[in-house]
Image (spheres, coloured by chain):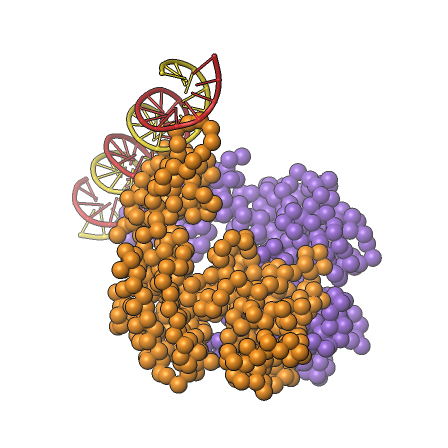
Chain colours: A purple, B orange, C yellow, D red
Amino acid sequence: MRAHNLALVLRQVAAAHRPPSRADVAASTGLTRATVSALVDDLVGGGLLAEVGPAPRAGAGRPAVGLVLHAYGPAGLGLEINVDYLAGCVVDLTGTVRHRAVLHVDQRPLSPDTVLAAVADLGAQLRTEAAAAGRVVAGAALAVPGLVSGTGLIHRAPNLAWHDVDAAGTLAGGPLGDLPVTIDNEANLAALAELHADGQGLDSFVYVSGEIGIGAGIVLHRDLFRGARGWSGELGHVCVRPDGPRCRCGALGCLEQYAGQEALLRDLPAGEAGLARLRADDELARHRLPSAGTSLGVALAGVVNMLDVDTVVLGGIFGPLAPWLAPSVEAELSRRVLTSAWSPMTVRASALGPAAAAVGAAGAVVRDILAEPAEWMRT
Amino acid sequence: MRAHNLALVLRQVAAAHRPPSRADVAASTGLTRATVSALVDDLVGGGLLAEVGPAPRAGAGRPAVGLVLHAYGPAGLGLEINVDYLAGCVVDLTGTVRHRAVLHVDQRPLSPDTVLAAVADLGAQLRTEAAAAGRVVAGAALAVPGLVSGTGLIHRAPNLAWHDVDAAGTLAGGPLGDLPVTIDNEANLAALAELHADGQGLDSFVYVSGEIGIGAGIVLHRDLFRGARGWSGELGHVCVRPDGPRCRCGALGCLEQYAGQEALLRDLPAGEAGLARLRADDELARHRLPSAGTSLGVALAGVVNMLDVDTVVLGGIFGPLAPWLAPSVEAELSRRVLTSAWSPMTVRASALGPAAAAVGAAGAVVRDILAEPAEWMRT
DNA sequence: CGGAATTTGTTTAGCGGTTGAATTATTTGA
DNA sequence: TCAAATAATTCAACCGCTAAACAAATTCCG
């Protein structure tokens, strides 16, 4: 009960627009001021909340002491392994990114152990930076482009050609071995980053992560949807045409064959160079992207009919290509989604830059702490 | 906290295989015997639990008093409107069906008000029967083949040609006007019935409801998944081929055009007559059903790739046709679902008979009471 | 047959945590 | 300078759970 109320108070402070007073929190939670005072004292003592000078306020009365999440409380380390880069960042309790790093290296020729060692080194370096700035990293999360078990086993990462990699075990032996590390799918964590990106109250959406493969992170009522075993969101392998071209996964007509990076860049240089060319050449883009958008729309329409979300966010490489993709996606959705008749769908580009998953990962670490403050303060 | 623990105790009693004693419940919940005693006394006083004579037990010691859900506690009324029948039933707290009724009438020529009045009458009649047997109906739930809002507004029921029908408002004026009535999608409630059907511990599955249309109810971790607005599960309008035949919804190539009842019974008599013919004529069934199963499999593979469930339950008319449908559904799933490589899918026929949704609806009413006993006992 | 052992269920004192009212603290405004 | 207003703390009361002792009802075994 104590634990529950601690989390409740913390949530109110985090959600407030300006630093609330103890009295404000009492009013918004329904608890009494006495209780809130006691809880806040605990949270301040535990390093999760800080008091700030009273905001200039009109009217009489004793000035309120503002409460904010402690900017030097426990920090989260986010790491990302993707096909053509590694990334990492450190965020504080407020969700602000304090340090970041990206390494552009194609990971495909490297062994899983090499890649995991490299990303651990990147993380250790960021942790040192954070420590120098007075922030202690309390935990880490790693984003990978594949299907991951809760135990940290990567079952399959098709575009890295990994399978059955015990990432958690390998990391435990490295320089981050003393940190609790969770491992999650890249699209899931990017979706979380999108959810908590500044302001705009997205409640439920599908985040489409266009990288070498196509993944999706599903957010429902501000909560990440993981499916039964954590393996949801394999949008790239939803069927667009049952008799279409063969996919790397073995099936026919998967979305990835129509809207994956390799399909978009056919006859163009691979990677960023080809994408830049596509963005620069409006003629080319108009010729090639709408049909990919239609395929994306067909697949997403099925997803939306089943899942019932009202917003699609185009992320990864689809973000910058949204001007050409979104109209055909939107058209297909409004044609095929039953509910769009009385409740139209929204399609928009992601608000995030590259390495969104790393930011989401770091944010997930601190939000875990905020969600269970009692757990954190026991130590 | 009290409320939480009351529900906890109730859940343990409901989940037990044989009537547990207070001591058993204490052991399985982690509460002390003293606390459980107090909680149980409240629940017995509130008419939710009953004590039964001590079971003959081996060993020494004072004999235990068994606890069971009160068979004469509050009962739930379930109602179902479907295209070619109305159904209703009353279940007691244990989930046992005590009274039932079905009316085979084609509802399509009738107005919504007429149909709602008829189903309300059916409900009132069942309530009278239940009262005569000493059971008081505490609430009702109505299943409809369409998209429903939480407020009881039926946005669209394509196969009844209904739209914007205020079912809750209409029912409030009828003979059930004094009961709290919730309204929900037919496939959702049938899925709940399947979930709570005797025994076998299904945890997460997609229940495919084949009626005139095709719907789906999604259960994840023994919890109904409703999507963002409660409009999930429109499997019938997932796209199988983007350039397929036009569907009643306006789009091209919806699953319903390949595996809906009308597609299955092309050139056969409509309704039960045609279905009987199909079941009787193995030659015909082998010729026609596997291709429908393949389409179903294509659509379900996309769903499973996104949602990550490991079991598909074929219900409604698909249940009896499962021997011909399931193999091709299964084949398509194992071809197309990524996770099936290391975690194979299961496809099975529903354990339920007709009017599954009515049973699910009635069960939902009593489970709501069991989930919040404090709420119920306040009255 | 009768007492010890055993298990169930209740009683009682104590404790953590919340509430509500009273109290103290700090400011504005007349 | 003092009253009014608002913020935060203190303190007694209370609710619900726990732990341990106790009462009740049965079996085991000499």
In the picture, which quadrant includes the N terminus of chain A? top left
Q: Which residue occupies the foreground of this view, A267 or B209?
A: B209
> What residue is at 80 percent from the left and 77 percent from the top?
A267
Q: Which residue occupies the foreground of this view, B282 or B167?
A: B282
Where is residue B371 drawn, in percent x and y?
39, 52
Q: Which residue occupies the foreground of this view, B257 or C3?
A: C3
Residue B123 as seen in the image, left or right of residue A73: left
Residue farthest to the right, as pictured = A109
Residue B107 as seen in the image, left or right of residue B300: left
In the picture, which quadrant includes the C terminus of chain A? top right
Q: Quadrant of residue B114?
A: bottom left
> What residue is at 54 percent from the left and 81 percent from the top?
B274
Q: Is residue B79 above or below residue A181?
A: below
Q: Is residue B218 above or below residue A294?
A: above
Please say whether residue B296 is visible from this viewpoint.
Answer: yes
> What residue is at 50 percent from the left and 44 percent from the top?
A372
Q: Is residue C9 above or below residue B42?
A: above
Where is residue A84 drawn, in percent x and y?
75, 60
Q: Which residue occupies the foreground of this view, D6 or A301?
A: A301
> What residue is at 27 percent from the left and 68 percent from the top?
B177
